[in-house]
Amino acid sequence: MEVKIFELLLGLAGGLGLFLYGMKLMGEGLENAAGDKLKNILERVTSNPISAVLVGTLVTAVIQSSSATTVMVVGFVNAGLMNLVQAAGIIIGANIGTTITAQLVAFKLDEVAPLFVAIGTAIIFFAKSQKRKEIGNIVLGFGILFMGMGIMGTTMKPLSSLPQFHNAVIAIGNNWALGILTGLIMTGIVQSSSATTGIMVAMAGSGQIGLNVAIPVIFGCNIGTCVTALLASIGTSKTAHKAALIHLIFNIFGTIIFIPLIQPLIYFVQILSPDNIKRQIANAHTIFNMINAIIMLPLIKYLIKIVNVLIKGEDEKEKLGAMYIDSRLLETPIIAAGQVVKETVRMAQKAKANLLISMEAFETNDETLVNKVYENESIINLLNEEITNYLVRLSKRELPDKEYGIIASTYHIVNDIERIGDHAENLADLTLEKISKKLDYTEEAKNEIKVMFNYTINALDIAIESYESNDVAKAESIFAVERRIDACEDEYKDNHIKRLNEGLCNAYNGAVFMDILSNFERIGDHSTNIAEAVIKNS
């Protein structure tokens, strides 16, 4: 008997492993195939709870994991990109979206699963475009998922001969609390409510359990799936903690509401799908989550009030470092890639702001502004470090070729932005020299500095806008501006020599003037590098 138990556990573990891997492969294929559309959907989430629920449902149906969606929401909230109303809506939608997996596994496709594996493998091996390879991953993942279901079902058929299992089934069937606890523990361990539901479907399909056992376990798995988000919220902001807690409270309340409705639910799904217990379990899962969503959606503001009472206070100040990137988003690499672009644009805007401040400081001799430049430069350096480290981690994930190209170019773009920040700091240093030496310039020299500065800002704007929107035409327009910057530098240097010969300025004035022109020219070069990276990846 011990050998049989070992073989049973081995078969169950192997089948579950295939099921989880197939689900992951299918989810990643769908995610990568959706590409920018998935990113655009998330970016358009508004404070309208209904639209947030729809987004949560769709995203979870694509990535095949409510846990991944909820972790992503925690990351967005922690980054300040999403408020609690939006987060609550997406979390509610994620609970609906995760039922898609249960509906899929309810199909009796384990016998033809090898065909899906063969077709998916063939597409991956012979397809030339990345898009078609992702379709191959979807088909292959679909086949592996059902092979895992088949192995679990076959493995668990001898279970009925074990008296211990028979007694456990009777105990759970007579005690809904024990069933809920079982589902909670199982899901907490495997970190996937879909896996727990899959096991229930496989066991029911092989005649080992009935609905009276499966449904309480499914209620419990909805609570157990909250463990992932709660763990992901460790070390985050208070608001992110609140988002994870909303997930837990929503599922606990939903389970409490349905406890007295277990028998009516069983009767209803039996009427919907007679003689098909797999579909009955899947439908029970779907109905449970959809009705919960309908009940809890109007109560979102009260959910938020509850978590505000449980977790008091707000986050006190804005983060000095990265705002848009979060390690939790690495679970959905295509979303993380979009966030990297946002964070890099934010860094570039800070560098531009520092350039504007340094120029204002030079014109007004304001040392307070000089100190502001130095403060901002430390933030730019911090962002450079954080974005680069994030890019290293992200580059190890599976991404479509287009996103890989963006990630590769962003390494260099971040470095160019950091150098632009350095040149803004150089201008602040030159301002201090101007103040300490009480330097002054002719109106002609001041005008030349202003003209070249305007061209430089124009080049930087073009670089930032073209990178943010991946606009090749915009990027190509920088070359004319760059030529004008170079021409201005040559012309103004000649003019400076004339003024020097005429005694209108001294050598020290001239050295600072020439350094200013040189820093503007170098900023123009780095801006051009950014635009060229956009063109290269088009």
Image: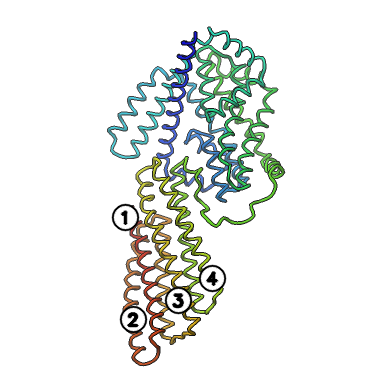
Q: Which amino acid, by three-letter code, is at mark 2? A: Lys
Dot 3 falls on a residue whose secondary structure is helix
Name the N-terminal-most of marks 2 and 4: 4
Across and down, in percent, residue 453 comes to 42, 74
Q: Which amino acid, by three-letter code, is at mark 4? A: Asn
Q: Which dot, 2 or 1, sits closer to the camera?
A: 2
Q: Which dot, 2 or 3, sits closer to the camera?
A: 3
Seen from this angle, which residue lies furthest right? 309
Find residue 86 and report its image quarter.
top right
At 68% from the left and 42% from the top, the residue drawn is 307
Residue placed under numbered mark 4 in the picture: 371
Dot 1 falls on a residue whose secondary structure is helix
Q: Residues within 10 Å of mark 4 (few under 14, many from 20)?
A: some
Dot 4 falls on a residue whose secondary structure is helix
Q: Is residue 520 left or right of residue 171?
A: left
Name the N-terminal-most of marks 4 and 1: 4
Residue placed under numbered mark 1 in the picture: 536
Name the N-terminal-most of marks 3 and 4: 4
**Residue 38, numbered circle:** none
Q: Residues within 10 Å of mark 2 (few under 14, many from 20)?
A: some
Residue placed under numbered mark 2 in the picture: 493
Residue placed under numbered mark 3 in the picture: 430
Find residue 216 and report its image quarter.
top right
Across and down, in percent, residue 232 comes to 55, 40
